[in-house]
Amino acid sequence: MLPSQIVEEIARLTAENSRGAEALYEAEVALAHAEFELDTVEQKAFIKTQGTVADRTALAKLESADARLQRDLKRAQLNRIKVKIKTIETTLMALGTQVKLIQSEMR
């Protein structure tokens, strides 16, 4: 990789990493809303059902399955963003190493 290509790649990854911070925040907010929705649906279902605690719990979980799925999907999205940010940071460190190697070769 040429030095100019490395500089361009570092600039691109830095910009993407900056966008990642905002995406991470948005995903955390979406997950919090999904968890709130799940808790609300599950508790309302528990309160309105009849029977033993085990029966009520099972019915509440069944009734809140869609909200649980949405929460899990939001959590998966958050985790994917975290992994992508970590990958970008690792790539930036590798590029930094390449820059140092090129500098030492030029001396």
Image (cartoon, helix red, strand yellow):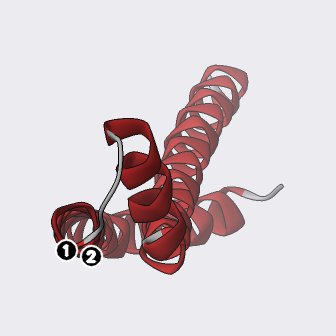
Q: How far apart are marks 1 and 2 (CA)?
A: 5 Å
- Report x, y in % for residue 55: 45, 48
User: Label 2's element?
Assistant: helix
Which image quarter: residue 4?
A: bottom right
Q: In this view, does 106 lie to the left or right of 25?
A: right
Which image quarter: residue 53?
A: top left
**Residue nearer the viewer, 53 or 84:** 53
Above or below, 107 against 94 in this view is above
Asked if disc 1 and disc 2 are in contact, CB closer than 8 Å, the reply is yes
Mark 1 lies on residue:
33
Mark 2 lies on residue:
30
Q: Is residue 105 left or right of residue 44?
A: right
Q: Nearer the viewer, mark 1 or mark 2?
A: 1
**Residue nearer the viewer, 2 or 53:** 53
Q: Is residue 81 left or right of residue 56?
A: right
- Residue found at x 29% / y 68%: 49
User: Of the residues shown, which amino acid type is indicated by label 2?
Assistant: Ala
- Report x, y in % for residue 97: 61, 27
Disc number placed over residue 8 in the picture, else none:
none
Q: What residue occupies the far front of the structure in this picture?
A: 51
